[in-house]
Amino acid sequence: MRGDLERVLFDEPAINRRLDELAEQISNDYRDRDLTVIAVLNGSMMFMADLLRRIPLPLKLDCLSVASYHGKTQGSGEVIFKQVALPDVIDRDILILDDILDSGHTLAAIREKLETAKPRSIRVCVLLSKKKKRAQQIVADYLGFEIEDEFVVGFGLDFMEGYRNLPCIGVLRKELMARASR
């Protein structure tokens, strides 16, 4: 699988160092607060597991299953929520965890939906943020890495459900994406 990468952007030690820094920042910000972490499935699973093990605070964990890429390399703009009920977040501080901030459609839709449940606060933490103009103006409160506007895989990020289990983050070779889209 690693041979399918054009190049590695962040290796495992770099990711681990950044997770340590994020965990320290989040732990300091949420000390003595009622934290609920809501992970966006499936992309944030690796990020969520590795980050939350580093946060020594009591917290609730829930997940939202949404789809916006629909098997493509670009978001469609349509965000589909796959569960009926929202997590119970009334009067709690929410931290949304997602793998990547791209167009902003997914995180904006999630934030809007969660606001209807009357939380105390909502912040966003993403592993990656693309340097690009977004369709929805949303900013991550906590950011792992900023990247160029290119398609990446690994550490939870996928291409057609593959590559999520790579321990690094890299750019997938363009010919593999082209072959798959035929």
Image (spheres, grey):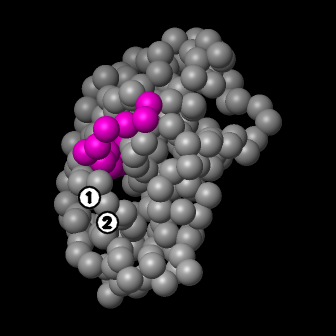
Left or right for 156, reference 131 = right
At label 2, which amino acid type do we have? Ile
Labels 1 & 2 near each other (Cβ < 8 A): yes
Residue at horizontal 69 percent and vertical 40 percent from the top: 81
The magenta region covers 125-136
Q: Which image quarter holds the C terminus?
A: bottom right
For this rendering, which residue is in front, 151 or 125?
151
Question: Judging from the image, what secondary structure is the residue with disc 1 in?
Answer: helix
Camera sees residue 16: no
Calculate the distance from the C-alpha at mark 1 to the C-alpha at mark 2.
Answer: 9 Å
SS state under label 2: strand
What residue sits right under mark 1 in the picture? 15
Graded by Cα atoms within 10 Å as few (under 14), some (14 to 19) or many (20 or more), the crowding at tag 1 reads some
Q: Quadrant of the N terminus?
A: bottom left
Q: Tell me what residue is drawn at x 26 percent, y 32 percent.
A: 25
| Lower sequence index among marks 1 and 2 | 1
Residue 154 coordinates in the image, percent (x, y): 39, 68
Q: Residue furthest right?
A: 84
Residue 27 lies in the magenta stretch: no
> How would you rate the neighbour count of disc 2 (Cα within 10 Å): few for under 14, some for 14-19, many for 20 or more?
many
Camera-side residue of 76 and 6? 76
Which quarter of the figure has residue 124? top left
Res. 30 mark: none
Label 2 sits on residue: 169
